[in-house]
Image (cartoon, rainbow, N blue to C red):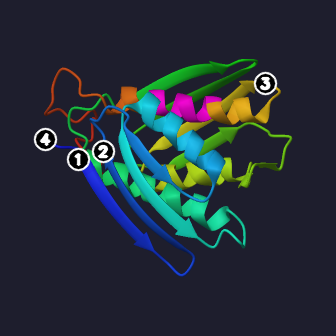
Amino acid sequence: MSRVSKINRETKETKIKLSIDVDGKGNNSINTPVGFLNHMLTLFAFHSGIDINLEASGDIEVCDHHIVEDIGISLGKALNEALGNKAGINRYGTAFVPMDEALCQVVLDLSGRGFLHFDGEFKREQIGNFSTEMVVEFFRAVAMNFNGTVHIRVLYGVNDHHKIEGIFKAFGRALKEAVTIGNDANKVLSTKGTLSI
């Protein structure tokens, strides 16, 4: 079964065209006006193995909030659509990623229930034209739209670039584990019999 999705999202604030292949090789073409986000999504694609093609534009002259959040919404919706009824997936994923002096952890459950717990702080307000407060907003948008429980912790670190990079890499690796098909491709890993609600 092909686990692919295409999302076109257009509002008065943003225009986003996104396609993903969950069973890809991490190939990507990512073009947004937020350079640091491009870098982070490239790392996410590589570590998750998900192919991503993304073209996004928006009212960046206002600030980066709308475009970063809407990309998170679109990515969450695309993942949810591509995974379908989630039959056969491992469901859970955990990753610790060190990035020099920083250590980050992501634990997730593709449970059918959107939730984000975020434990981390940043000293800088911005990296390039990316607001560090948007890390939380991005992952909240992903979690709520792919209906998954996501716990993110920055265990320690000094450099905000390193912390955020560790988070995106850990999210990619945890997601790769969670979406991998286990021994029974027809089994939904829930006593309820569904992960879709």
Q: Is residue 116 magenta?
A: no
Spot occupied by residue 127 in the image (x, y as percentages of width and height) = 76, 46
Residue 1's disc is 4
Residue tagged 2: 195
Expressed as whole percent of the image width and height from the top left, the position of residue 187 reads 17, 32
Q: Which residues are magenta?
A: 166-174
Q: Which mark is residue 85?
A: 1
The numbered mark at residue 157 is 3
Q: Is residue 173 visible?
A: yes
Type of amino acid under label 4: Met
Q: Within the image, what quadrant is residue 117 found in?
A: top right
Give neighbour class at mark 1: few <14, some 14-19, many 20+ (Cα, 10 Å): some
> Dot 2: within a 10 Å radius of its alpha carbon, few (fewer than 14), some, or many (20 or more) residues?
many
Of the two numbered discs 2 and 3 in the rendering, the one whose residue sits closer to the viewer = 3
Image position, residue 74 (x, y; %): 44, 59
Q: Are marks 1 and 2 in contact (CB under 8 Å)?
A: yes
> Which residue is found at the position 67% from the left and 63% from the top?
65
Prevailing secondary structure of the magenta residues: helix
Residue type, label 3: Gly
Tell which residue pokes out farthest to the bottom in this image.
12
Is 24 in front, or is 195? Answer: 24
Quadrant showing the N terminus: top left
Name the element at disc 4: loop
Query: Mark 1 to mark 2: distance in Å?
Result: 7 Å
